[in-house]
Image (cartoon, grey):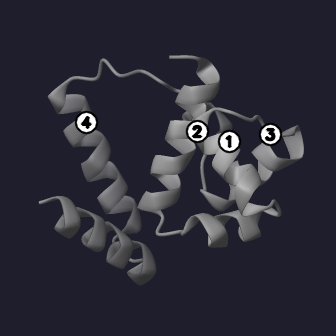
Amino acid sequence: MTIQKKLGKKIQTLRKIKGYSQEKFAEAIGIAPTSLSLIETGNGFMTGTTLDKIVSVLELEPQDLFNFNDSLTDEDMYNYLVNKIEFIKNDTKMLKIAYSFFKSIL
């Protein structure tokens, strides 16, 4: 899989975790939904400005977006999730998003 496709898939996954529809996310980062679709499918790329906006709206560090390490141990993944839950425990909006996500997959 190309880096463009990996990046697009990661953006799509993180967008959904944050609870954004494709239209709302595109609006938040200042591009057309069709452009976002091209980015998420790996059939288009973004400008540096759009990349900055994506990182900002998703509340990420830039390096987090480009970390494609799929060889995490179960313990690493569990600890990551626990740390994120601890981080958002006082943020009702984020807790609701996380709750909805987990409820939808479990």
What residue appears at the point 21 percent right and 23 percent down from the top-left corner?
Answer: 73
Q: CA distance from mark 3 to mark 2?
A: 12 Å
Query: Which residue carries the number 1 mark?
Result: 39
Q: CA distance from mark 4 to mark 2?
A: 25 Å
Q: Is residue 69 left or right of residue 75?
A: right
Disc 1 vs disc 3: Cβ atoms closer than 8 Å? yes
Secondary element at tag 1 = helix
Query: Which residue carries the number 2 mark?
Result: 41
Q: Residue 78's spot in the image, x, y percent? A: 20, 41
Q: CA distance from mark 1 to mark 3?
A: 7 Å
Q: Is residue 99 left or right of residue 40?
A: left
Q: CA distance from mark 1 to mark 2?
A: 6 Å
What residue appears at the point 28 percent right and 48 percent down from the top-left corner?
Answer: 81
Which is more foreground, mark 4 or mark 2? 2
Q: CA distance from mark 3 to mark 4?
A: 29 Å
N-term-proximal mark, 3 vs 4: 3
Type of the residue with mark 1: Ile
N-term-proximal mark, 4 vs 2: 2
Query: Which residue carries the number 4 mark?
Result: 77
Is 55 situated above or below 98? above
